[in-house]
Image (cartoon, rainbow, N blue to C red):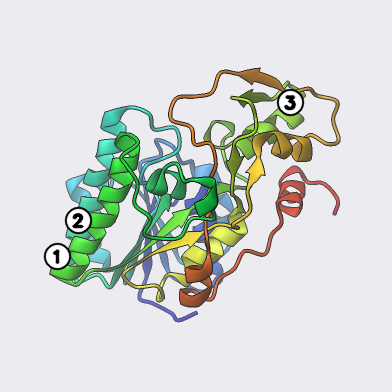
Amino acid sequence: MAQVNGVLVCGGAGFIGSHLVDRLLADGQSVEVVDDLSVGSLANLSAARASGGTLRFHHLDVSAPEFSDLIALRRPTVIYHLALLPTGATRTNEMLRSATLLLSVLEAARRFAIKKVVVALPAGLLYGEVPARQLPVKEGRKSEPMGVAHVMANTLVDLLTVYRESYDVEFTALAMTNVYGSRQRPTDGVVAAFASAVVNQSAPIICGNGRQTRDFLFIDDAVDALARSINKGGGLVINVGTGVQTTIKDLWHLVGRETTLQETYESARHGDLQRNAVNTTRARIQLGWSPWTTLESGVDELLGRKV
């Protein structure tokens, strides 16, 4: 991977962000982390801090005026923004704040001639409910607005496009499916929730009938796509997933196969998708990326099972 003049990761103390920091340091990059720790944790960066690489942490809100000062001082070549539309954001003001956070990064990039901005967006929010015959969904699919989060996800892509065309700020937007792995909070993903149920010997909860499908992506695979985007995929939305649909019920049978725990069911949550999976042809072509971790092996690694 090409060496760049420093990388800044917004949300770098979070689940995906901290794993990306580990990877960037392993690749020899100098890394700055910006995180307000509202979701992330310094504990997630313990491995990175012990790795011996060049790492600086800034306890800072991306929307604060000091963020622009930091960019002016450090002048990173690439900014990763992984704090957009966080899992669990349900209130309208939380979703709308994502535009403010992205604009703060884009404005700083414009003012100080930052080479590139890379963002990760939830594919489910970007595409909405997709008919079964159109799955795995390809980039660029438009659908009727399904809610504030769906509108906001597409608005963020529009903002990236405007700054690229008007101010020459390059971007790559990765539309990621359901990422899972170590450091993920049980409240932020169904795999993490099921794994927590196994560890704590508590009955797992399935919302809905369990027949809804998701495209589960292991954290190492997700981070590899992010790392490759540092100098590839300019101006594109790129799907990152496996293209494989797994029902929530089948997921539990895989995660809990060595236990006698029985799942319990609750009412479906408002706005939950019925099915989701993405086509990754563009990722193969533009990033040279393909997923390599099967759901079974990823779950086994997460739970520390012998393979």
Viewer-side label of 2, 1: 1
Q: Is residue 245 above or below residue 2?
A: above
Residue 209: image location, x then y, percent: 63, 26
163 sits to left or right of 59: left
Q: Label 3 amino acid?
A: Asn
Residue 143: image location, x then y, percent: 35, 46
Residue drawn at point x = 43 percent, y = 30 percent:
271
Q: Label 2 amino acid?
A: Ser
Residue 169: image location, x then y, percent: 22, 69
- Residue extending farthest bottom: 2
Residue drawn at point x = 47 percent, y = 70 percent:
282
Question: Residue 68, which numbered label?
Answer: 2
Say which element carries label 3: helix
Disc 3 and disc 1: Cα gap in Å?
50 Å
Disc 3 and disc 2: Cα gap in Å?
44 Å
Q: Label 1 amino acid?
A: Arg
Q: Earlier in the sequence, mark 3 or mark 1?
A: 1
Residue neighbourhood size for the residue with mark 2, other residues' Cα within 10 Å, grouped as few (<14), some (14–19), many (≥20):
some
Say which element carries label 2: helix
Q: Earlier in the sequence, mark 2 or mark 1?
A: 2
Q: Earlier in the sequence, mark 3 or mark 2?
A: 2
167 sits to left or right of 282: left
**Can you identify the residue that label 1 sits on?**
111
Query: Can residue 13 be seen at all in this image of the molecule?
Result: no
For the residues bearing labels 2 and 1, Cβ distance under 8 angstroms? yes
293 sits to left or right of 7: right
70 sits to left or right of 14: left
Residue 230 lies in what quarter of the image? bottom left
Q: Where, quadrant-wise, is the C terminus in this rendering?
A: bottom right
Question: Residue 200, which numbered label?
Answer: 3
